[in-house]
Amino acid sequence: MPPRRILSPPSIWDVAQVAEVFRESGIKSSHVARLYRHLIRNPGNGWSDVDNFPEAAAGVLDANFSYLTSTLQQVQTSSNKETTKLLIRLQDGMQVEAVIMQYDTTGKGRESPLTGHARATLCVSSQVGCQMGCTFCATGSMGLKGNLTTGEILEQLVHANAVMPIRNIVFMGMGEPLNNYAAVREAVRMMTDTGMGFGLRRSAVTVSTVGVVPRIADLAADLPGVSLALSLHAPTQELRQRIVPSAKAYKLEKLIAQIDSYQQITRRRVFVEYVMLAGVNDGADQAHQLGQLLQGRDMIINLIPWNPVYSPDISFEAPASSSLAEFQRIVRNDYGLPCTIRQEKGQDISGACGQLVIEQKSGQAIKSPTRDIEELSRKPIAAA
């Protein structure tokens, strides 16, 4: 486990800490919601001019909290203006990256990232680095440096909203979200709280996991309206634990059983992420095995061609287009499963899936999903 990170002062976006300090100071809890409604509707403003806000509350916040504990170090936009990468420096000097991806389904062009008929999806990080060690992912080569606080997760959204309005959130950046469960859960609740949140619908938030089985059950109980994406990457236990070392602890049979239970509780479609590695998991045999594993379940399989990462420890190759097409054909036609091929955005700024890693000397980065969740979603599973 990484050392526990304690911010001093903590972020105003750490809602639980603010509520606790208010309780200890005898300040009514109703002022918590009033505070966040003001901060969200008035970006960049502090709490001194919140309507009907007690002077004591403002004093407590002045003494104990910071409006932002992180700083936006760099904003980098891809050549086609569709992907914007944010480098964010944390209070203790560590760094994470978030990625804004724009989608315009009107068919109209736009002159800049801030104009046109686009909706924006933000890919957020939940940890600095990752302990899961997926062999194809640059983030895994970092190891786990630390967990983000709820406030640090929400600050990524605050920074992004200053660049452009965000409509969807995907927890697919650095880290395994379910290994930082409490902070992720509280951040999602804040994002989707209609009383004081950022105005996002629950269905506009997707949490990805490589398969932390016990936490999937918690997610179903705590956040049933949030979408789940499963990073599967292999159709058999033997192959999966070669690609995803954490699969040794979370066996495929138990993982799929837990996903079945999740769907019975939430009645929601699950997204399956499958990174395609040439000569490893992209063959017709693997396509049939995947189809047999998932047939009859309400899932969308998203095939992701592997993207080069800048690490001497990672040496894979992207699949041929013919392999992608045949794999998709088998899964779709033989097993009746919706199956898409992800066309990555932001590769020219290291903004494609599996590329997220902070290298201060080389400046190389980043991991991000690029199919908009709204394009893949449909209505939840009908109740039995």
Image (cartoon, rainbow, N blue to C red):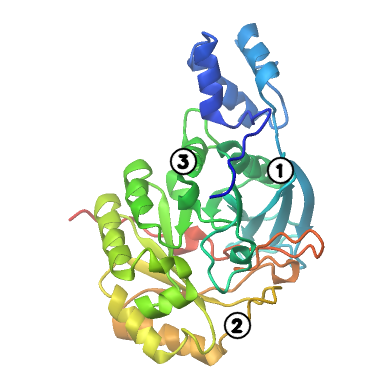
Please report the residue visible at 37 percent of the width from the left and 90 percent of the height from the top. Answer: 285
Regarding residue 320, the answer to whether it shows in the image is: yes
Q: Position of residue 200 (x, y in %)?
A: 51, 42
Residue 207: which disc?
A: none
Mark 3 neighbour density, 10 Å: few (under 14) some (14–19) many (20 or more): few
Mark 3 → mark 1, Cα distance in angstroms:
19 Å
Mark 2 → mark 3, Cα distance in angstroms:
34 Å
Q: At numbered mark 3, what does the secondary structure look like: helix, strand or loop? A: helix
Q: Is residue 277 left or right of residue 60?
A: left
Residue 316: which disc?
A: 2
Please report the residue visible at 52 percent of the width from the left and 92 percent of the height from the top. Answer: 322
Q: Amino acid at mark 1?
A: Leu
Look at the picture and state if 234 lies above or below 60: below
Residue 90: which disc?
A: 1
Q: Amino acid at mark 2?
A: Phe
Between 351 and 258, the one lying in front of the other is 258
Mark 2 → mark 1, Cα distance in angstroms:
32 Å
Mark 2 neighbour density, 10 Å: few (under 14) some (14–19) many (20 or more): some
Between 118 and 132, the one lying in front of the other is 132
Question: Where is mark 3, residue-wise?
Answer: 182
Q: Position of residue 311 (x, y in %)?
A: 69, 73
The image quadrant where one finds the C terminus is: bottom left
Q: Position of residue 122 (x, y in %)?
A: 60, 52
- Tell which circle, 2 or 1, labels the residue nearer the N-terminal end: 1
Q: At numbered mark 2, what does the secondary structure look like: helix, strand or loop? A: loop
Mark 1 neighbour density, 10 Å: few (under 14) some (14–19) many (20 or more): many
Look at the picture and state if 90 lies above or below 117: above
Q: Amino acid at mark 3?
A: Ala
Please report the residue visible at 62 percent of the width from the left and 31 percent of the height from the top. Answer: 40
